[in-house]
Amino acid sequence: QVKLVESGGGSVQSGGSLRLSCVRSGDTYSGACMGWFRQPPGKELEGVASFSLRQGTSYYAESVKGRFTISQDSSYNTLYLQMNSLKPEDTAMYYCAAAPCSDYVLNRSGGGIWGQGTQVTVSS
C-alpha cells in the first residue's frame, strides 16, 4: 500500500511563496501520474499539477501556469510543488495524489491514493 504525507502548507501574504512536499512510502507505485489537487472552501476540486512518471511530462492548470512548478527528487519518493506569486484565490486545501493522469485534467477525485492534505492560506 502506498502512503502519501503532505507538508509545507501555511499562511502567506499575497505575492509570497510556499513549497509543498509529499513523501511517498510503502509499496512501489506503478501508476501513471503523481501530482496535486486543491479544493478551496466551498468550491470544487481542481487538478493543479501532475507529473507523468512514464512520459516525464508535466501538466499545469491554467490558473497556476507560470507560478507553480512540480518536481520530484531523484528517487521519486518525494514530490514537490513550488508555489510562487501566490494569490488569495490560491487559498485551499492541497492534496498530493497518485492518480490516473486524466484525473488531474478532468478535476476528478475518487481514483488512486491521496494524502490527508495541507492547508494553504493566502491573505491580501
Image (spheres, rainbow, N blue to C red):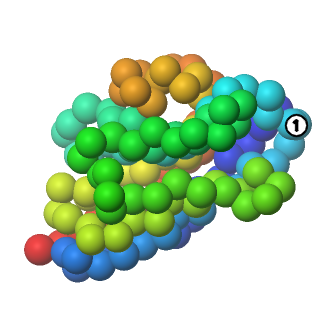
Crowding near the residue tagged with mark 1, few <14, some 14–19, many ≥20 C-alpha atoms within 10 Å: few
112 and 41: which is toward the camera: 112
The spot of residue 48 in percent (x, y) is 39, 43
Q: Classify residue 88 as left or right of residue 99.
A: left
Residue 75: give x, y in percent of width and height. 83, 55
Q: Is residue 3 above or below residue 105?
A: below
What residue is shown at x 26% (from left), y 32% (from top)? 44
- Residue 111 horizontal side relative to residue 56, left or right: left
Q: Quadrant of residue 72?
A: bottom right
Q: Secondary structure at mark 1?
A: loop
The residue under label 1 is 27
Q: Is residue 61 above or below residue 21?
A: above
Estimate the x, y position of residue 104 in percent, counting from the top left.
45, 30
Identify the residue shown where x is 20% and y is 65%.
87
The answer to which of 76 and 58 lies nearer the viewer is 58
Q: Quadrant of the N terminus?
A: top right
Is residue 37 visible to the viewer in this orientation of the structure? no
Extreme residue toward the left, this view:
124
